[in-house]
């Protein structure tokens, strides 16, 4: 089977790595990929949002399975484009069409979905330009802190937690009137602040059946002790110690099953990943958000724990055969440490030579923002540069090994958090 993975980050390198291990995988392509994916498969230097070119590539290269990593192509309708073309519609495809991708693409839509299907989430109201006066009254009377969320995709920056009413009014105005997040903030969800501990649960579904992948906790802040600015993710651990059988049973009954059934009831055929961001509030799970894709860096942490055939899992997902698939997962713990560029998540340099990759021992190295330059050196090409993942008999052991190997990788401006998993050590 020839497989095409869409995307260019650590998540896609982890997909590629896991797919390549399968006897089902013949040719493997990553579009556009990075320096790491080029060692596992063939990088395809095309724009993933140019659906016509991607479609042509699939036909020319006899692609038999497409797996989409990031949300943007899904929210913009890559699946719809494939469904509308008789030569592409028969290619098994992992990732929802636009109706399903709204789970991530519109916070207002996903909140209404949860309300409609009685899925526990923070209480909320949505406001627009037309209803801004009501919105201002609503935030002024709201308990503190109050959470403001831009409805659309805002590159992970669209959520604001306001500690004062003045700040909340200011931000609501900035989002709706001054388009602080562009079109994404034309609608703003104002919601209750949930106090608890976060984790991510990953579900893969063929539209009817589903499998729950290992849970993970990611570390979003740039600084140790969870301080400083939010990033895409500085590392992750799996499993999450407090996500025990009792907690996961609640997640399954109150959240996963109603989500899958809700999609069916709403007439949405969803095949792909559902990444559920959860808050455990005194042991009770609430949905913070849905994403229509896997997490990054959580994929780099979770996938190495999966011991059953990943290509077969993806094919079963795309062809409605998940019920027949047996998912197996190692008992071992996994920890990922993300090496980033100095300045990230603000401005950072690109093009710094990366050295020492070959000296890594006992860990997996997934490239996030890297490329091969004209001199054939691997250089930095993003804020998040390299994810180092290790398995171990405990989270502590896995983190220690990832850090030991992170030390061996060198480039100018390297930074990483040394406290990934700290609350579980
Ligand atoms: P999101 O972009 O939806 O992932 O939100 C970013 C982060 O904001 C989440 O990971 C949470 O840490 C935080 N957050 C979002 N919604 C809430 C909420 N209702 N209560 C508390 N924290 C929240
Ligand atoms: N690590 C969080 C995300 O992928 O959205």
Image (tube, grey):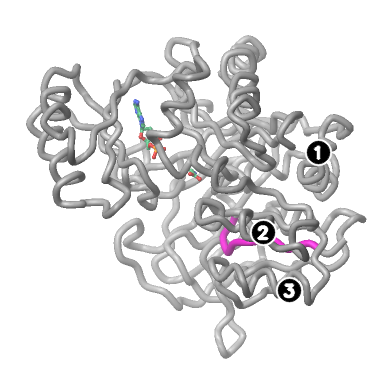
Observer-side mark, 3 or 1, equals 1
Please identify the quarter of the rendering in which residue 96 is found. Answer: top right
**Considering the numbered disc 2 on the image, is that residue within a helix, a strand or a loop?**
loop
Which numbered dot is residue 84? 2
Residue 326: tell me if it is visible: yes
422, 407: nearer the viewer: 422
Residue span colored magenta: 3-10
Q: CA distance from mark 1 to mark 2?
A: 19 Å
Residue 410 vs residue 142: left or right?
A: right
Dots 1, 2 in contact, CB < 8 A: no
At label 1, counting other C-alpha atoms closer than 10 Å, the crowd grade (few under 14, some 14-19, many 20 or more) is some
Residue 157 part of the magenta segment: no
**Considering the numbered disc 3 on the image, is that residue within a helix, a strand or a loop?**
strand
Residue 235 vs residue 343: left or right?
A: right
Observer-side mark, 1 or 2, equals 2
Q: Earlier in the sequence, mark 3 or mark 1?
A: 3
142, 134: nearer the viewer: 134
Mark 3 lies within 8 Å of ligand 2 (Cβ measured): no
**Considering the numbered disc 1 on the image, is that residue within a helix, a strand or a loop?**
loop
């Amino acid at each position: 089977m020839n497989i095409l993975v869409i995307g260019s980050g650590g998540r896609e390198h982890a997909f590629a790595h896991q797919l390549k291990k399968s006897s089902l995988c013949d040719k493997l392509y990553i579009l556009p990929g990075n320096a790491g994916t080029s060692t596992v498969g063939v990088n395809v230097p095309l724009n993933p949002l140019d659906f016509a070119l991607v479609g042509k590539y699939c036909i020319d290269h006899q692609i038999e399975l497409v797996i989409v990593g990031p949300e943007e192509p899904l929210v913009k309708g890559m699946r719809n484009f494939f469904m509308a073309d008789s030569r592409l519609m028969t290619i098994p495809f992992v990732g929802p069409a636009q109706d399903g991708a709204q789970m991530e693409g519109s916070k207002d839509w996903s909140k209404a979905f949860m309300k409609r299907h009685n899925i526990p989430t923070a209480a909320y109201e949505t406001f627009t330009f037309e209803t801004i006066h009501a919105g201002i009254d609503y935030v002024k009377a709201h308990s503190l802190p109050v959470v403001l969320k831009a409805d659309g995709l805002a590159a992970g920056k669209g959520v604001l937690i306001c500690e004062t009413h003045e700040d909340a009014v200011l931000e609501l105005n900035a989002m709706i009137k001054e388009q602080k997040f562009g079109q994404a903030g034309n609608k703003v969800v104002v919601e209750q602040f949930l106090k608890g501990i976060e984790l991510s649960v990953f579900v893969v579904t063929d539209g009817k059946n589903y499998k729950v992948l290992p849970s993970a906790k990611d570390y979003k802040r740039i600084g140790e002790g969870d301080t400083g600015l939010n990033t895409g993710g500085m590392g992750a651990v799996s499993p999450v110690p407090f996500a025990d059988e009792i907690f996961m049973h609640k997640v399954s009954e109150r959240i996963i099953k109603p989500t899958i059934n809700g999609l069916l009831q709403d007439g949405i055929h969803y095949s792909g990943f559902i990444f559920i961001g959860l808050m455990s509030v005194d042991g009770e799970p609430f949905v913070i958000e849905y994403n229509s894709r896997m997490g990054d860096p959580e994929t780099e942490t979770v996938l190495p724990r999966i011991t059953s055939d990943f290509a077969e899992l993806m094919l079963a997902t795309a062809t409605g055969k998940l019920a027949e698939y047996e998912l197996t997962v190692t008992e071992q713990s996994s920890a990922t440490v993300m090496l980033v560029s100095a300045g990230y998540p603000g401005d950072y340099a690109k093009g710094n030579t990366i050295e020492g990759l070959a000296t890594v021992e006992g860990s997996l190295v997934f490239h996030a923002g890297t490329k091969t330059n004209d001199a054939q050196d691997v250089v930095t090409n993003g804020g998040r540069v390299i994810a180092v993942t290790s398995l171990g008999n405990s989270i502590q052991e896995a983190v220690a090994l990832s850090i030991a190997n992170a030390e061996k990788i060198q480039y100018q401006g390297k930074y990483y958090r040394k406290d990934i998993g700290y609350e579980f050590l």
